[in-house]
Image: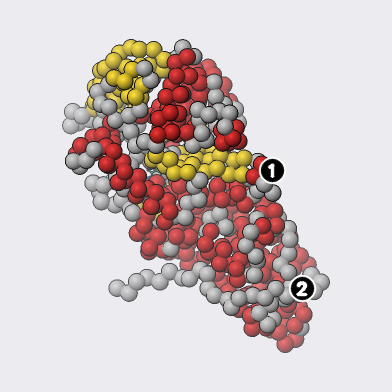
Amino acid sequence: MTSSDRTPYYITTAISYPNGAPHIGHAYEVIATDVLARFKRLDGYDVRFLTGTDEHGQKMQQTAEREGLTARELADRNAARFRAMDDALNISYDRFIRTTDPDHYAASAAIWKRMEQAGDIYLGTYAGWYSVRDEAYYAEEETEVGEDGVRRSTGTGTEVTWTEEQSYFFRLSAYQDRLLELYEREGFVFPETRRNEVASFVRSGLSDLSVSRTTFDWGVPVPGDPDHVMYVWVDALTNYLTGVGFPDTDGELFRTYWPADAHVIGKDIARFHAVYWPAFLMSAGLPLPRRVFAHGFLFNQGEKMSKSVGNVIDPHALVAEYGLDQLRFFLLREVPFGQDGSYSHDAIRNRINSDLANDLGNLAQRSLSMVAKNCAGRVPGPGAPTAEDRELLDAAAGLLEPVRAAFDEQQFHRALELIWRTVADANRYFTAMEPWKLRKTDPERMATVLWTTLEVVRTVGVLVQPVMPDSAARLLDLLGLPQGPARDFAALGERLAPGTELPAPQGVFPRYEEPAA
Ligand code: ME8
């Protein structure tokens, strides 16, 4: 199949502020998005996957000043760390965008001019509360003064400062009705709780949005007025367009992939993606993304991560401790996507030892080692199936459909739960059939039991590739399944070919052993 035969699917993560090193919350988002991108590729889509860093704004400038660097130096140093994290996490992005990339300046200027031509940009004076930490404006009633006399955002707890300056405004208030209509569209903002939150914010009335700043200069210059830089969220959101070649709307990238199918983001930035972004696009006369998925927050043993508490977890350390695929599996299996989740050493260890080592690892190990010993290391040939064989094979063959449905709603934990139910069935089947006894009494029946079990391992191996790319590849290697199309979801309906020579079996999912004290 050439790429043009396949349905395009454009998926993005939020772009992270590189004002510090990446943490596990960043890793969580990019892993979940990678899993979706890989799933769609295996399911026959022509996927484009964008991730990167959001490098402008006051927060970056202030952090750089504190560290005695220029904003550009800070961005260069930390963007490299985000990219290194993505590579260490096996993230299959097609482009790592930095908002300091030259083509991004061109895209940001172009969307600005379109909004200006639509009559939606005007010059005024901004006076109100601004949170540098959140890079967000808040209405007075969204803030409160704490006992320490400091005014903070009630939603995020970050300090706000009074800001008064000449500013360009975007006529956001004109989009209220069109936005409310948009939220009626099934699944534009997902999950439902976030949609309700965003809709009630919009229903309560929208003010025009200040979209430029004059008190610092680390940003994209406003076309025609270089005293102003764009408000960082205007340029940040535009990254999704830059990633498909905007402003070249006639170009192949743009024509193929825009509008985006999914913007995957955290719940704290739903307002920017579900209110400002569609309004900018409507104003610019561009099609709207199909879905904004807001995931929950990840906490360390239930506690919010913060530099001052000292519980910020470096994703590289978790990979070193538990293994990459183990971490990827844990994050998606443990935390219902969309809800907040927690991770702890015990929870990760338990998932590794029960789901991976005991359940899937054991199923593969015991069937493959019997095949190695008793079937001359070749895929055995099955005889006529019994009712039990058929039931198990049907369960495996029936997995794709509900797993795909769960993925389409980003219910990864549900998809994995379904797959693991079949793994448990297969382990029970294997134990009940006692193939080790059949070896002497009925070798043909033994061959059927082993083949049936390997078929389940193949199906599971193919389906878990998005979540655990390396481990699944090793598992499929052990089954002698050639790389390439035989591992696509379209090939799930095929069967393991009897007689295929198999490599010597090896454990793919080791137990986690506590380091000696
Ligand atoms: O918000 N758990 O950047 P960012 C889960 N530059 N997700 C988390 C998290 C946690 N503990 N902490 C952060 C920005 N995230 C903007 C985005 S997009 C055009 C601009 C998520 O570095 C957060 O919700 O603060 C966001 O989706 C992403 O990490 C980057 O956060």
**Residue nearer the viewer, 94 or 89:** 94
Of the two numbered discs 2 and 1 in the rendering, the one whose residue sits closer to the viewer: 1
Coloration of the structure image:
secondary structure
Indicate which disc, 2 or 1, sits on the residue closer to the N terminus.
1
Q: Residues within 10 Å of mark 2 (few under 14, many from 20)?
A: some
On the image, the x and y values in percent for residue 505 come to 58, 76
On the image, the x and y values in percent for residue 496 come to 71, 67
Q: Give the image quadrant in which the ligand numbered 1 is located.
A: top left
On the image, the x and y values in percent for residue 399 come to 67, 55
Which amino acid lies under the numbered mark 1 shown in the image of this protein?
Asp
Q: Residue at x 57, y 21 (%)?
A: 181
Picture layout, residue 362 above or below residue 231: below
Picture layout, residue 442 above or below residue 247: below
Q: Residue at x 61, y 57 (%)?
A: 463
The residue wearing badge 2 is: 382
On the image, the x and y values in percent for residue 473 come to 57, 63
Which amino acid lies under the numbered mark 2 shown in the image of this protein?
Pro
Which of the 4 quarters of the picture holds residue 3?
Answer: top right
**Residue nearer the viewer, 446 or 232:** 232
Which of the 4 quarters of the picture holds residue 227?
Answer: top left
**Residue nearer the viewer, 167 or 195:** 167
The residue wearing badge 1 is: 5
Picture layout, residue 308 above or below residue 253: below
